[in-house]
Image (tube, helix red, strand yellow):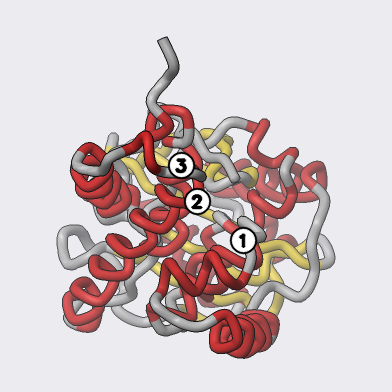
């Protein structure tokens, strides 16, 4: 019996939806809606099921993204993407790993819905302009122009340097070791002077509503957190295709993703919103 194309391409479809939405929960909802649409199609007449399914998922994700835009504007504090536990294998596909990184997903949040869809489908999944146009309701020529603008927008905001996996792992391990000891000096050594830390509590748990700037400020915050809790456990994990950290403060999980340049941490994304931390135990299946 031939496997249903939706099942065959499910990991790909989830990745498309997740990169467009930055939320695994919303991506799963989009897949459910897309499955219902697919089930109502005369599938024997579909010449290219993969392209057809990507088109359905893109349309549903665009609808969801436009609906979510207002709620994200009203979100308490900084909104960060939902982190995903991933296997080290995801990092083998460098383009995929970069595209699902927390740093990149945060940049994609600054694009409009159509620009984001075009960027993801063209730059990550390398779809032809014609197919992208069918998915977003634009001509191939219009899609080409949108893709160019989106590339320029992202290039101006993405991390400047791509570091090796071993360098990222080494910095993560030093960072987590410093957190365990609460040693301020060690933290200052691995933080860039102009480091920025963004925290997301969603109004559910304590978190700053604005980013923190500067190595001294950030190091002091971590040192104080170490003193205030009874138990602090750190675990090196893979989040969104890169080495990262899980920190349990008195049993409450926190996901920490780091951007590293020249051996130092330039940006820290801290997700504390418990609604975004439900996928830290089972690796997500991503594909392109």
Above or below 49: residue 285: above
User: In front: mark 3 or mark 1?
Assistant: 3
Circle 2: is it few (<14), some (14-19), or many (20+) Cα within 10 Å?
A: some
Instruction: Give the residue number, with chain letter if any, for mark 1.
Output: 127
Q: Residue furthest top?
A: 1
In the picture, the disc for residue 51 is 2
Instruction: Give the residue number, with chain letter if any, for mark 3.
Output: 49
Tell me whether circle 2 and circle 3 mark residues in contact (CB < 8 Å): yes
Q: Residue at x 54, y 65 (%)?
A: 131
Answer left or right for 234 relative to 92. left
Assign the C terminus to one quadrant of the image.
Answer: top right
Answer left or right for 160 relative to 18. right
What is the CA distance from the residue labelled 2 to the residue labelled 1? Answer: 9 Å
Above or below 30: residue 130: below
Q: Residue 257's x, y, as percent?
A: 54, 55
Q: Residue 142's x, y, as percent?
A: 55, 88
Circle 1: is it few (<14), some (14-19), or many (20+) Cα within 10 Å?
A: some
Tell me whether circle 2 and circle 1 mark residues in contact (CB < 8 Å): yes
């Amino acid at each position: 019996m031939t496997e249903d194309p939706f099942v065959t391409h499910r990991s790909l479809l989830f990745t498309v939806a997740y990169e467009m939405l930055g939320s695994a929960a919303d991506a799963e909802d989009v897949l459910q809606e897309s499955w219902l649409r697919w089930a109502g199609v005369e599938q024997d007449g579909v010449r290219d099921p993969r392209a057809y399914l990507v088109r359905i998922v893109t349309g549903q994700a665009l609808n969801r993204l436009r609906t979510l835009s207002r709620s994200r504007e009203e979100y308490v504090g900084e909104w960060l993407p939902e982190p995903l536990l991933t296997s080290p294998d995801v990092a083998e596909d460098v383009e995929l790993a970069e595209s699902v990184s927390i740093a990149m997903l945060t940049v994609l949040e600054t694009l409009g819905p159509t620009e984001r869809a075009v960027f993801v489908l063209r730059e990550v999944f390398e779809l032809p302009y014609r197919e992208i146009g069918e998915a977003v309701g634009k001509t191939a020529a219009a899609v080409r122009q949108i893709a160019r603008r989106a590339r320029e927008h992202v290039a101006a905001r993405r991390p400047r340097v791509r570091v090796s996996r071993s360098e990222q792992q080494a910095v993560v391990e030093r960072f987590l070791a410093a957190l365990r000891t609460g040693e301020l000096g060690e933290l200052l050594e691995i933080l860039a002077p102009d480091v920025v830390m963004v925290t997301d509590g969603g109004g559910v748990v304590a978190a700053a509503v604005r980013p923190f700037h500067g190595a001294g400020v950030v190091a002091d915050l971590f040192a104080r957190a170490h003193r205030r809790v009874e138990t602090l456990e750190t675990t090196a994990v893979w989040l969104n295709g890169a080495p990262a950290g899980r920190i349990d403060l008195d049993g409450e999980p926190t996901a920490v993703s780091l951007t590293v340049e020249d051996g130092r941490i330039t940006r820290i994304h801290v997700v504390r919103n418990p609604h975004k931390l439900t996928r830290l135990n089972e690796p997500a299946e991503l594909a392109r």
